[in-house]
Image (spheres, grey):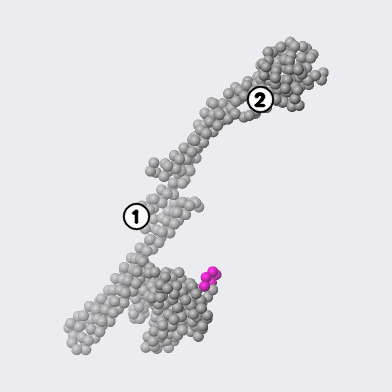
Amino acid sequence: MRSLFVKIFVWFALAAALIVVAHAVSTILTEPDDGPVRGVEPSLVMFGTTAAEKYEREGKGALSDYLDLLGRTARIRGYLFDAVGNEVSGREATPEKKEIAQKLSAAKEETFSKAGQIGIVARKVVAPSGNQFVMLGEVQRPINVLMPFSLHFLWTESVAMLLTAGVLCYLLARYLSSPVVKLRAATQQLAAGDLSARVGAANGRRRDELADLGRDFDVMAERIQSLMDSQQRLLHDISHELRSPLARLKIALELARTGDGPEAGWALDRIEREADRLNDLIGQLLTLARLDSKPPNRDGGSVDLKRLLDEIVADADFEARNSGRAVKLVACQDCQIDGNEQLLRSAIENVVRNAASYTAEGTSVEVSLRCENGNQDEHAVIRVLDKGSGVPQAALANIFHPFYRVADARDRQSGGSGLGLSITQRAVHIHGGSVSASNVPGGGLLVEILLPITTRQADQVY
């Protein structure tokens, strides 16, 4: 009984068997009130009229012969009573029958019926002469008349019902348990390391809850496979990223050992620079790992986005001026959200610094903050626009992936690790928002961050 199929089959089969038994018992014990007797009433009128005519024309003997014939052919034992309740054929009638005839003759009713194993039905009839009689018939009701079905037929019907119910229960149990069996097989494949295991095709065109469960499993398996692939790519990228600065550190260390004077000083400066780069890379990797494994609490309090953006733009502009670039806050409204300020600072700062690195020399990065109404909620929209060469259309969806670079040589020269936008995307998602990138006509990349607003103060644009 550990099998779901067996449990479903047994319970459905047991339910069907109980229904069949209940039907048989109710058929045997239940008897119609007067169904079989009532079916005799129309014929009894004709029989009674004929019997009364026989009695008046041919006498008592002819009536007795007619009633005997009626008993042999119609299986009705007949009695004919006159208006005062006397049986005129000479047959011996019980006091009950005489009483029934007398009461019916004196009453306004035309018919009397009494159900039982021996049913009694009585009917007023009028002879051709106008005299009134009461025709009473006893209907012997054997077992095949008493019950809708004979015991033999009832047994045959019960067996047929059980067989039919058994087949249907088998098909139903198989139909219900089959997706579970397939899901279990796919789960075992997944547990064994086959990340391509899916159950979608095995469910065919099913549209029930079990099919939904299979589709949810496929989504889960797809997500697991994607995460594992991302993990493999991340490990590969990390090893690649660490190898380059370590190689340069090794070379600088050798130069520092063998050189003297200015050459040794240059080597030591190089060692310091590569160590800082490694430290920054490891810090970003740790931040990304924390966001993926256990996101920080977003409910750190109310964050004033206007103040936060002022600080980020001021810092980025100070750094960008050394390379002939600028960062400007072109529009800013007072917006506040509930969130983690440090996490939001890191997310926005990564986008702004990335734009300052790739905007053309002599140009400015334009940053804006506006409060906009969507279909249901109000959002703070942060837009960061640079004046660089943009990103190929096919690469837009990938720039938020860890270590993704549009052009390796250029990104390496800029000193970027390829993790900043990944951290931004995860931080924004933690706050219930979204981030996207698009090219603008004439060149440049626009990164747009949407964050849900909790409070909106009076607009203050400058």
Residue 392, by quadrant, is: bottom left
Residue 271: image quadrant is bottom left
Who is closer to the viewer here, 104 or 292?
Answer: 104
Residue 425 visible to the viewer: no
Q: Residue furthest top?
A: 61
Label 2 CA crowd tier, 10 Å (few <14, some 14–19, many 20+): some
Residue picked out by circle 1? 191
Amino acid of disc 1: Ala
Residue 65, x across and y down, in percent: 71, 12
Mark 2–mark 1 Cα distance, whole angstroms, equals 75 Å
- Pick whichever, 295 or 12, lies toward us: 295
State the SS at label 2. strand
Q: Quadrant of residue 37?
A: top right
Q: Amino acid at mark 2?
A: Lys
**Place of residue 415 in the rendered image (x, y in percent of width and height, measured from the top left):** 34, 80
Q: Which mark is residue 114?
A: 2
Residue at image point 64% right, 23% down: 119
**Which of pointers 2 and 1 lies earlier in the amino acid sequence?**
2
Does the magenta stretch mainly form a helix, a strand or a loop?
loop
Vertical order, 45 against 267 (above or below): above
Q: Which residues lie in the magenta part?
A: 374-378
Q: Residue at x 25, y 76 (%)?
A: 247
